[in-house]
Amino acid sequence: MQKNAKIYVAGHKGMVGSAVWRALEKHGYTNLIGQSSKTLDLRNQDAVNAFYKDEQIAVVIDAAARVGGILANNSYPYQFLMENMQIQNNLIDGALKHGVEKFIFLGSSCIYPKLAEQPLKEAALLTDSLEPTNQWYALAKISGVKACEAIRKQFDKDYVSLMPTNLYGSHDNFDLKTSHVLPAMIRKFHEAKLNHHAPVELWGSGTPMREFLHVDDMAQAVVFALEGQLPEHLYNVGTGKDVTIKELAETIQRIVGHEGEIRWDNSKPDGTPRKLMNVSKLKELGWQYQTELEDGIAQTYQWFLDHVDDFKEVKM
């Protein structure tokens, strides 16, 4: 890949997109393109096609999506299904029509069946039913994976899908109504610490197991995919290690310095019992994660402290 190749990072202001942007700059790429949602609405097919026509993009990295945790997915199923399909369909189809030879589609481990054999292999896709609480987002992402696979098969273009496990890190969403579990816990424990170490109430039983990958490691996986030609269309990206939600909570509590009680609300859903990725395919090609979970949480909490006055509520 030429260092001056024009690379469009869709969603470059988000947690994943901004990490990809930083990684590309660090690796010497000099011709990066980004558009805010105010200047380019990715749900608008005509606008996306006009953008592709004007810019003559060489590579697209699709990190743009409507994202959120269990509460957001349950509350806004239509937006999570339709907006994600609109965004990715416009990006993928527009890239094909305008001669983009390389496309990296970023999805999520939630594409795999709820009760698929652990660790999750890429071959488990579409073998059983999805987790009901995030099926809307999962269905959208599955359609993106299959669209890239179809283009790869029919048109022989280097379109590849990377499915990360649960991501966290700087520029994460800490809005309690729409965030994922790890950033939500950081904020809850921090605010409880400031409130005289008040008790912290957390959803579910604490028994489900989850895998977490620092977003900077995910960005390095994108660079790895960019600079090589991966032989298959779908790759898991993760650490291959998981922890219980209870262990996660206790780790965050210790790093934040909260000394109060943790209360588990068993009336709230746990979601998928376990979601561990089999990452052997990408590892065999030469990529693996670098950031251990405790170190990554400490880095993320420091970023949170440095930006605690800048957070905005996420509107649906």
Image (spheres, grey):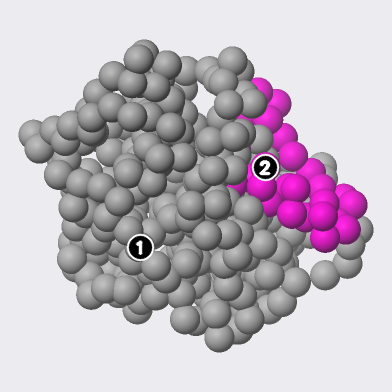
Segment tinted magenta in the rendering: 14-41
Which element type, helix, strand or loop, lies under badge 1? loop
Tell me residue 42's x, y (percent). Answer: 58, 37
On the image, which quarter does residue 260 sit in?
A: top left
> Which three-letter amino acid code belongs to the residue tagged 2?
Ser
Say which label, 2 or 1, has the lower sequence index. 2
Label 2: few (<14), some (14–19) or many (≥20) C-alpha neighbours in 10 Å: many
Considering depth in this image, is 244 or 174 the residue closer to the camera? Answer: 244
Tell me residue 76's x, y (percent). Answer: 30, 30
Q: Report the residue marked by disc 2.
A: 18
Q: Residue at x 56, y 30 (%)?
A: 304
Residue 255 on the magenta segment: no
On the image, which quarter does residue 286 sit in?
A: bottom right
Above or below residue 239? Residue 8 is above
Tell me the tag on residue 242.
Answer: 1
Tell me the tag on residue 1.
Answer: none
